[in-house]
Amino acid sequence: MFSASQSSKAQFLDKARQAREERRELKERERAAVQVQALIRRFLCRCRLQREIRLEDFFGTNESGSSKRSALSVFRIARKLLFVFNHKEDKERFEKLCRCILNSMDVENEPKPDILQDSRLVNLHLTMLVTFTDTSTWKILRGKGETLRPAMNHICANIMGHLNQKGFYSVLQILLTNGLARSRPSLSKGSLTAIFSLALRPVVAAQFSDNLLRSFLIHIMSVPAIMTHLATLTPERLAVIESHDLFRKFILFLSREAQCRDVCVCLEGSHTLCLLGNLVYLGSLNDKVLEEETAHFVGVLIHMLSYCQKYVSQKKSNLTHWHPVLGWFSQTVDYGLNESMPLLTKQLQHLWGVHMIRILFSDVLSKKLLENQEIAQLPTQPVSPQNSLPMKNLFKRAFQKSASVRNILKPVGGKRVDSAEVQKVCSICVLYQTTLTTLTQIRLQILTGLTYLDDLLPKLWAFICELGPQGGLKLFLECLNNDTEESKRLLAMLMLFCDCSRHLITILDDIEVYEEQISFKLEELVTISSFLNSFVFKMIWDGIVENARGETLELFHSVHGWLMVLYERDCRRRFAPEDHWLRKDLKPSVLFQELDKDKKRAQLLLQYIPHVIPHKNRVLLFRNMVTKEKEKLGLVETSSASPHVTHITIRRSRMLEDGYEQLRQLSQNAMKGVIRVKFVNDLGVDEAGIDQDGVFKEFLEEIIKKVFDPALNLFKTTSGDERLYPSPTSYIHENYLQLFEFVGKMLGKAVYEGIVVDVPFASFFLSQLLGHHHSVFYSSVDELPSLDSEFYKNLTSIKRYDGDISDLGLTLSYDEDVMGQLVCHELVPGGKTIPVTNENKISYIHLMAHFRMHTQIKSQTAALISGFRSIIKPEWIRMFSAPELQRLISGDNAEIDLEDLKKHTVYYGGFHGSHRVIIWLWDILANDFSPEERAMFLKFVTSCSRPPLLGFAYLKPPFSIRCVEVSDDQDTGDTLGSVLRGFFTIRKKEPGGRLPTSSTCFNLLKLPNYSKKSILREKLRYAISMNTGFELS
C-alpha cells in the first residue's frame, strides 16, 4: 500500500516539475519574441526615420553649402548627417558640411586647387584637418575666448591621437607619393604645405617621441625627394624643420642600430633609398649639425646602404628586379617610383658633391702638401641640385696647370691606427666604398665627384703613408690576416683610394698626367705603383687570393685594377725606371716548377701580374706552351711516329691567291702542323729544293709582305710612324673578311713557329689583338695618338676650348672622303643633327676616337683576331703588353748581339770559325758597320732586321754561312772539292766581281772566298744596301 502511494507521489512531483519547466520556457519564448519584435521595430523605425531625414534638404532649398550659419545650426546639421551618413551617397553633403564648418571658423589660406583628381575634395579635407589639429586659426578663441584655448588644444591633441591610431600617416604617405613621385609634381604649394604641417604636428605635440619619429621617418621622410619638393615649392617648411632641429633628431634616432634596422626592414630597399636621399639633402643644408654629428651621420648612412647592399645582385635572375639606381635587386621594387629616380639621384649627388666632401674629409684636406706655398682653396659654391656635382667643370679645372712644388709622398708611418682621427677617416671611406658597391648604376658619377678636388687623393695617400709604425705595405698585409673591424676599415680606405685614383688616371690624358701632373706627381706614381705591385704580389704569392671571398676579393680586384692602369700607361709612355715592375725575390725557375705542378698561386701570378716576371722568361714560357701543345697534338717528330705533313703547291706569280685557296680550308690542327711548300716558277716549272721548313718560311714571309703592303689596301699605315692597321676601305676586296681571317692565321702561324716577321703594327691595334679594348678601364682617347697624332691634337684642343664650343658648328658625326666621295658617319643615331656643346664635348671626343679606331674597322679586326686566335690561344699572349707582343711578332728591338750570333752560327763549304774571311766578316760587322747597317745585314740574311727575342739560339733554321765559288745559277751545293778548297782558302779564280747573296728561307749567307778584307767590306755593304737576294737554289 505504501509503495503504491509513494509511486503516485513521485509521478505527481515529476508532472509538477515538467509543468514549471514548460511555463518557464513559454515565458522565455515570449520575452525573446518581444525583444526580437522590439529590435525589428527599432530597426524599421530607424530606417523609416533615415529615409525621412535623407529626403530633407539639410542646407535649405536655395542655400549653398558655403553660406554662413550659426554654430548651433551647424551642430544640428552635422548630427543629422552623421546619423544617416553613407560614404558613397553623401559625398556632396559631407563636402557642404565641411564648408559650413570652415565658414563658421573663418578659416584663411585654404589650399588652391591643383591638377590632382578629386583635388577640390582633397584640399577641403586637408583644410578641415589643418583647422582641427591646431587652434591658432580659431577666431572664437581670440580675446575673451582665450580661456578656452587649453581645453581646445586638448581636443586637437585627442583628434591627432585618434588620427594616428587610424593609420593617418599611411594615408598621408599615399597622398604624397601619388602627388610627388612623378616627373612633374601634381601637388600645389598649399596642398604640400598642409600635408607636411599635418604630418609634423603630432611629432611636435608628442615632443618628438620615438614612436612618432619612427612613423614620420617611415611614412613621410621615405617619400621620394620630398625634401627637394619642399625646397622648391614651400621653402618655409624647411625653415620649420631647421627650427625644430629635426635633422639632428633623425640622425640620433637612427644612430641606434636596432631602430635603424627596424626602419629599414619596414621600408625595404626602394623606400630606404628614398629616405637616404632625403637625409643626405637635409645634411647638405645643415653644415653645423653635419660637422657636429659627423660620426652618427656616417654611421646611419653606412647602415642603410649596407641594408640595401644585401639585396643588390650582380646579375639578372628569376628572383631579381631592375632598379634604376641599385641595378638588379632581389627585393620587390616599386616601379611607381621610377619617375622620381632622377630627383632622387640629384639628392644623392650631394653626398659626393664638393661641399659635403670638404666637410667629411676636413681632417684629410687640412693637411699641407706644398712647400713655400699655401694651398689655393676653391671658393665654396652654394649648394643646389645643379652644382652639387659640377661634372662639366671637372675637366676644365683639371686642365689648369699647377705651378706648385711639393714633397714626394712616400710611406713614413708614425700615426696610430686606433686614434680618433684615423677611425673617423676610415668610417668616411667605408661610407663611400659602400656607396660605390651599392649604387651600382651611378658608380661613375660617384667616382667623378670624389675625384673633383685635385688635392683629395694625394692627401689621402699622404694620410695612408702615415699609418702604422712604418707606414705602407706591412700594415695592410697584416690587416689582410686580421679579421677585425678595424682592419676592414683600413682596407676599405685603401680600396676607396685605389678605385678613385684608377678612375682619375683613366679620364686624364697624357698631357695631364705627364706634363701638368694633375693630382699626382710622376715620382708619386712610381712610389704608389711600387706599393701596389708588392701588395698584389704578396696577396697572390702568400695564398690570400686563392681562398679570397667577398670583401677580400673585391679589395684585390680594386688594387689590381689600379695597378694595371698604371702599368698599361707606363707601357704606352714610360714614367717608371727600368725593371721597376720586376720582383727581384721571385726566381723564374721556382715559378716554372710550380707551373709544371699546376700550383694555384703560380697560375694566378701569371694570370694577374705577369709583368713581375722578366720578359725573356715569359717568352720562354710562351715557347714551352707551344711546344707542349705540339707534343699533345702529335706535331713533333719522335722515334716512333712522324707528324702529318700537308703539301701545297704555290705559283710564284699568284702566291697570295694560291696560298689563300689552299690554306684557308685546312683544319685548325693542320694549320698548326707541318706544311711543305713546292714553288712553281713563272715558266710553270717546279723549283729545285727540298723544304725542310726553310721554303715554308720564305713562303710565309712573302705572303706577309704582300698582304701587309699598303698598296693592296688590306692595311693602311698611320700618319706618323707608318705603322700598320686594317684599312677602313678594305671592303672593296671581294671576300675581304675571309682574307683578314687568313691573314690572322698566317700571322698566328709565324708566331706559333717562332718565325719573326718585320711587320710594325699600330699600338691601338695590338691592344685589340690582346683584347684590352674590352676592359672597363680602356680609353680610346689614350690610344688615339698611335693612329693619328694630328687628329689627337685637334680633339684635345676641343677638350681645352674655353669658349662656347657650339660656335665651331660641330655635330656628333664624322665626315670622311671615301674614294672621292664625302661620306657622313653618325657617331650616335641622328648624330648629324645633334650639335657639339660644352656639355657633350667630352662624349664627342670619346665617340670620335672610338669610331676611328674601332667602329670603322670592327669587322676587319674581328676577322683577323678570329684567325689569329685559331692558332694562338688568347691566354698565351695575355702575359704580354702591346709593345711586348710587337717584339714577339717582329723580334727584339735591342741592338744585335754579335757574340751571340757568332756563337750560334753554322759554317758550310769549308768555312770555319777561324777562317780568315769569317774573322774579317765579324770584325767588319763589329767595328766598321753602324747599328743600322748591322740591322740591314740581319734583314739581308733572315728577312727581319730584329734578332729573335730569346737570342740567336732560337733562330730557326740556325744562322749559317757558306763558302761559294760560282754564281747562284751555277751553284749545285757543296762538293768534296769545293769544301776542301774553301777550308784551305784555295781559289779557282778571284771572286772580286761577285756579291754576297743570301737564302732568307734558310737564314743562309753565301759568301765568296774574298782575298781582301776591304773587298769583303765593300761588297757586303753594297749587297745589303741593295738587298740583293736570289731565287731558292
Image: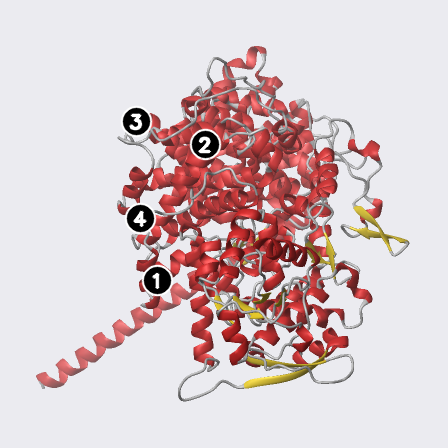
Front label number (1 vs 2)? 1
* On screen, residue 344 above or below 671: above
Check whether the beta carbons of the residues at disc 4 and disc 2 lie within 8 A of each other: no
Residue 998 occupies quadrant: bottom right
Q: How far is the residue under mark 4 from the one under mark 2? A: 23 Å
Q: Where does label 4 land, which residue?
A: 585
* Crowd band around label 4 with a 10 angstrom C-alpha radius: few (<14), some (14–19), many (20+): few
The image quarter containing residue 239 is top right
Residue 657 pos. (x, y %) = 75, 76
Q: Decide which of tag 1 and tag 3 comes sooner along the chain.
A: 3
| 147 lies left or right of 778 | left
Residue matched to label 3: 415
- Give the CA separation, mark 1 to mark 3: 41 Å
Q: Amino acid at mark 4?
A: Asp
Q: Is residue 163 above or below residue 626?
A: above
Q: Which residue is mark 1?
A: 592
User: Which residue in the protein does label 2 denote?
Assistant: 524
Residue found at x 76% / y 76%: 654
